[in-house]
Amino acid sequence: MLDLAGLAVPTAPRADGRPGSLTLLAPAGQDGWIAAVARAVERAGPMGATGHKRPAPPPLVARERPGEIALAVCGAHMSGLPLNGELTARGGRFLCAARTAPEYRLFALAGGPPARPGLVRDPAGGAVPLEVWAMPKPALGGFLEGIPAPLGLGRVVLESGKTVTGFLCETAGLSGAEELDPARGWRGYLEPVE
């Protein structure tokens, strides 16, 4: 209805003790994103009126549709960051938050703006947080054309074992780069440490 996606999710009880809930709305096609937000909201509260701790939910299984390709992004293209519009303007839609297999190193590349990360596969690395988006295949060529060296698209192995297309960095581009804690990821790098 109205070209929107909507989802109601239970929350912690209201101040008067009655059950609480939240209705989330997003543009059409953002079902995976809204489900991820709802999952985080629901996970924060107790299990209904029981007060028991909520068990860990099964992983979300948002998938690309026919004619789309799954694209892993680990930096400025993630939700809310400066280059995310390059995905959404081409019809990209959020599928899920994920992590790489524990074999990647993450760097803050020299140059910018905007600041950009470089993801390099290395058995001595760790699991890096990222987002997986669905990109219409016809839009991928124009997107690829705008990716500056030393970045490119290649195959990224996720913690689940699934392999998707994603951003990778040539090791030649690491001159002057700062190595980051892979567990904190790009968002952790951007957040000030207190």
Image: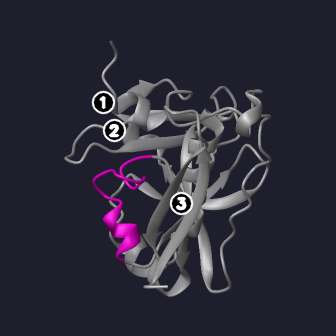
Picture layout, residue 125 above or below residue 14: above
Q: Which residue is mark 2?
A: 109
Q: Residue furthest top?
A: 194
Q: Nearer the viewer, residue 46 or 168?
A: 46
64 sits left or right of 134 in the view:
right
Among the two numbered marks 3 and 1 on one chain, the one whose residue lies closer to the N terminus:
3
Q: Which residue is mark 1?
A: 176
> x and y percent of residue 15 in the render?
49, 31
Which residue is depicted at the point 42% across and 52% down?
Answer: 78
What is the three-letter code of the residue carrying label 2? Leu
> Which picture quadrant has residue 145?
bottom left
> x and y percent of residue 39 in the render?
63, 48
Mark 3 burial class by Cα count in 10 Å: few <14, some 14-19, many 20+:
some
50 sits left or right of 184 in the view:
right
> x and y percent of residue 119 in the render?
50, 43
Magenta region, mostly helix, strand or loop? loop
Q: Which residue is mark 3?
A: 33
Among the two numbered marks 2 and 1 on one chain, the one whose residue lies closer to the N terminus:
2
SS for dot 1: loop
Whole-angstrom CA distance, mark 2 to mark 1, is 7 Å
Whole-angstrom CA distance, mark 2 to mark 3, is 28 Å
Check contact, mark 2 vs mark 1: CB within 8 A.
Answer: yes
Which residue is depicted at the point 52% across and 37% down?
Answer: 14
Q: Nearer the viewer, residue 41 or 185?
A: 41
Magenta highlight range: 75-89
What is the three-letter code of the residue carrying label 3? Trp
